[in-house]
Each structure stands twice: as structure tokens, then as C-alpha cells.
Amino acid sequence: MSDNKGYSSALDDFNGLNPENIKTYTTKDGERIAGDLENGTKAIVRDHSSVKSGNAPTLEIQNPDTVIKTIKIRY
């Protein structure tokens, strides 16, 4: 993962996972980009998080088939 902070680093890390079927969404809170990873998990990068989490850009990995279903990395 990148050492730099911010949305550009989150995007770099997302792209480094080589996702496929990439879709971009715009919500009232900001932008989200989602893609499928080779191992069947889903990666989502967004330029925001909740106010409680400091509204930080976030890279999220979702895998419903494991005990830890979601990993969130804040930048």
C-alpha cells in the first residue's frame, strides 16, 4: 500500500489490486468506485467515510465468504 495519505493514494492502492468490472457511482456523499478482484472479493474506494470515522477516504475490501466480511482502510 502507498505511504501517502488521501484519496489519490486510496485510488492508487485500489488500482494496484487490478480490479475488473469497474463501476463508478456518484452519491450525495461523494464518489465510489467498485470492482471485482480475481479471488472473488469486491474492492470499493470512496473519497469519504462517515463523520464518525473522520470523513477520510476509504478503501474497502468485501468478502462475504470469510469470518471477517469487510476490511476498511482509512487514508
Image (cartoon, rainbow, N blue to C red):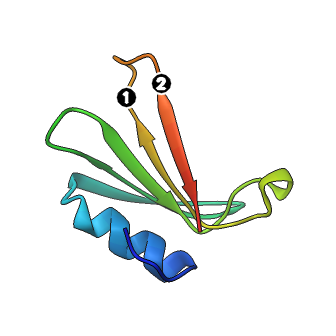
Q: Residue 22: x, y in percent? A: 27, 56
Q: Which residue is mark 1?
A: 63
From what the image shows, is residue 63 above or below residue 14?
above
Q: Tell me the mark number nearer the camera, choosing from 1 and 2.
A: 2
Quarter of image, res 64: top left
Image quarter in which the C terminus is found: bottom right
Residue 4: x and y, percent? 50, 83
| Residue 57 percent across, percent down from the top left | 61, 67
The correct choice, above or below, for 47 with respect to 36 in the image is below
- Residue kind at label 1, given as amino acid type: Asn
Front position in the image: 6 or 28: 6
Residue at the spot 69% in from the left edge and 66% down from the top edge:
56
Say whether residue 59 is left or right of residue 75.
Answer: left
- Tell me which residue sits at (54%, 76%) in the image: 7
* Dot 1: element: loop
| Count of number-bearing discs | 2
Are there few (<14), some (14-19), or many (20+) residues within 10 Å of tag 1?
some
Q: Residue at x 55, y 47 (%)?
A: 72
Location of residue 54 (image quadrant) = bottom right
Using the image as rendered, state which of residue 31 and residue 55 is in the foreground.
55
**Residue at the farthest right position:** 52
Disc 2 marks which amino acid?
A: Ile
Disc on the earlier residue, 1 or 2: 1
Residue closer to the observer: 20 or 38: 38
Q: Is residue 40 above or below residue 15?
A: above
Q: Marks 1 and 2, how far apart in space? A: 8 Å
Determine whether label 1 and label 2 are within 8 Å by CB.
Answer: yes
Determine which of the numbered discs, if any, sits on residue 49 in the image.
none
Q: Disc 2 marks which residue?
A: 68
Give the side of residue 43 with respect to residue 69, left or right.
left
Q: Secondary structure at mark 2?
A: loop
Q: Is residue 37 left or right of residue 35?
A: left
